[in-house]
Amino acid sequence: MRKQHSAAFKANVVVEALREAKTVTQIAAEHQIHPTLVTKWKAEALEGLTAHFERDAAKEEKTQAPERKITELYQEIGRLTTQVNWLKKNLVSNLTRCERLSLLERSPEASLPLTWQADLLSLSRGSLYYQPRAACAQEVHIKRRLDELFTEHPFLVRHGLP
């Protein structure tokens, strides 16, 4: 039956072997193991040691890479925000409302939603959905009659009706 040794046991044996205070044969006899196991564990430990230090450097690189990326992304966000604010300010000051309305993309395939476009062009979003409709005949008739009355009797509006 094969004997299983714990990692702590192996580490203790390897530390003794690395100290070189005793020979491999003496260490093996004290711990009741074969001398080739001591040599094998020592070689594995030395290989793992260089890999351990390489992993530490790689770990450090891996932890710094995301931090660098985050810093770069925040810088990009800041730059883009400044550019958008500058463009918004200049669009409002250099273009009329009608010209800004003509820049809107109302198609379903538009690259930006209408709400974002309205914000970038400094337009009221509610005004984008307003569709003027023709007045009904009755409303036109009432408005014409009011205009006729005002034209015939302008003093009634100033002083009120009797």
Image: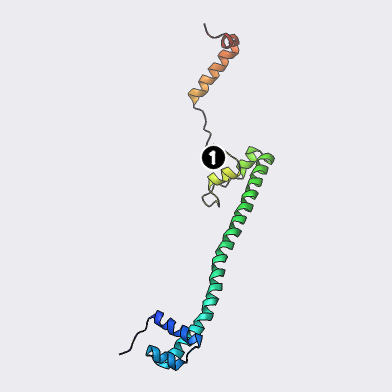
Q: Nearer the viewer, residue 147 or 74?
A: 74
In this rendering, the answer to whether 88 lies above or below 50 is above
Residue that appears at 57% across and 59% down: 70
* Residue 107 position within the rendered picture, expressed as x and y whole percent measured from the top left: 53, 48
Q: Quadrant of the N terminus?
A: bottom left
* Residue 36 position within the rendered picture, expressed as x and y whole percent measured from the top left: 43, 93
* Residue 12 position within the rendered picture, expressed as x and y whole percent measured from the top left: 43, 82
Q: Nearer the viewer, residue 144 or 23?
A: 23
The residue to which callout 1 is attached is: 125
Residue that appears at 53% across and 73% down: 56
Amino acid found under the numbered disc labelled 1: Arg
Residue that appears at 40% across and 82% down: 9
In this rendering, the answer to whether 160 lies above or below 8 is above
Q: Nearer the viewer, residue 99 or 3?
A: 3
Residue that appears at 49% across and 25% down: 137
Tell me where residue 91 sits by quadrant.
top right
Residue found farthest to the front: 21
Residue found farthest to the top: 162
Tell me where residue 27 sits by quadrant.
bottom left
